[in-house]
Amino acid sequence: MSGGDNLEFEIRPNPAPVGDAERAALLANPGFGRIFTDHMVTIRYADGKGWYEPRVEARAPIPMDPASAVLHYAQEIFEGLKAYTLPDGGVAMFRPDANAARFAQSAQRMAMPALPVETFLQSLREIIAIDRSWLPTSDEGSLYLRPFAYASEVFLGVRPAMEYLYLVIASPVGPYFSGGVKPVSVWVTPDYTRAAPGGTGAAKCGGNYAAGLSAQAEAIEHGCDQVVYLDAIERKYIDELGGMNVFFVLDDGTLVTPPLTGTILPGITRDSVIKLAGRAGRRIEERPVSLEEWRSGAASGRIREAFACGTAAVITPIGQIRSADDEFVVADGGTGEVTTELRKQLVDIQRGRAEDPFGWVHRVL
Ligand SMILES: *Cc1c(COP(=O)(O)O)cnc(C)c1O
């Protein structure tokens, strides 16, 4: 069972799903990550037994022993991706195979067992099928899928756990920015780093987010929307935001983004932007960019635009940069042309409104 075999999911429909009228009211303004569908997927794992008891069941609290390893040592990983309603009424996921591969990489870094890629994909298809009525049909809504796994073994010793639980929950979401896409302001934290070489920066684990909350709070205190991190060694180069990768657009149209050296999360949106821009003939440079290059480039006009990208908000322009000793703007603090164009191209492919040259859109229904 722990190999690549296709597991047979046991389906236990929710006996008391949310009624049509209530669901319609919830879907009218879902926000982000606030409301959830009627079901969840659960799969258990035990050493020696592999993955077992794959189920689709009513979404409900999970009983947890106070000595569950995850509550003490944070052995936990997650993914995030979206399902969309297509123009013909069908449903598709965007690059779920890339999420499956990254989930396996995160598991490896956190000394957790890998879930077979096909089981991961099947679990997503199952929850979409049973909770299809929760998919927003609006132009900008989607169903956010959150697969995750944690150490469920009841044990306080420090070693990789021998039991795990994998789950998928689903949350209908509206547009990330209710008033349309607006540039964000970012705070360059002088106090905190996100990830060091050899650390867990490239793994999608909850611990990275816990470690970033103080830095995010610092950003808010300084009147900024998001925190941006510098590298941990020289404290000079831009790594990424708390949960989004960063791109710079030069005056000749070149895209520049920090390289994946282990301290940056390998974003699927980042990869999609690189591939789309490359296909359009745009130059791409994956190389370090210092805060000083950003500052002087913004002043001289060499750096025309900057944006952050990730599944939740897709592509978000960065308007203002604030650090302990300085403050400056890019693209006059507005949204640059290249940023707008890339965002539109990507969203149109995701929603099945444009040709899908890379086979990214996986139809489910
Ligand atoms: C998930 C995540 C991203 C964006 O990844 P996508 O696959 O594009 O959603 C970027 N940075 C961090 C730290 C993340 O956790």
Image (spheres, helix red, strand yellow):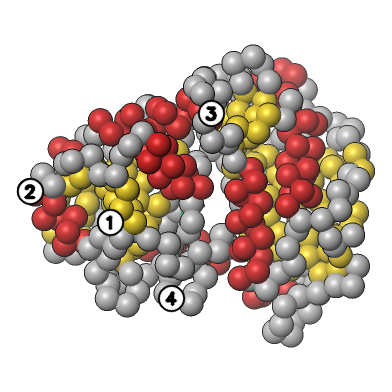
Residue 332 in the image, given as x and y percentages of width and height: 15, 37
Query: Which residue is depicted at the point 20% across and 45% down?
Result: 250
Q: Sequence order check: which comes first, mark 3 or mark 1?
A: 1
Whether pointer 1 and pointer 2 mark residues with C-beta atoms closer than 8 Å, the reply is: no
- SS category of the residue bearing label 2: helix
Would you name the residue on which mark 4 appears? 197
Identify residue type, mark 1: Trp
Q: Sequence order check: which comes first, mark 1 or mark 2?
A: 1
How would you rate the neighbour count of disc 1 (Cα within 10 Å): few for under 14, some for 14-19, many for 20 or more? Answer: many
Say which quadrant the N terminus sits in. bottom right
User: Comparing marks 2 and 3, which lies closer to the viewer?
Assistant: 3
Would you name the residue on which mark 1 appears? 187
Q: CA distance from mark 1 to mark 4?
A: 22 Å
Tally the marks.
4
- The answer to whether residue 276 is above or below residue 195 is above
User: Comparing marks 3 and 1, which lies closer to the viewer?
Assistant: 3
User: Comparing marks 1 and 2, which lies closer to the viewer?
Assistant: 2
Identify residue type, mark 3: Asp
Would you name the residue on which mark 3 appears? 356
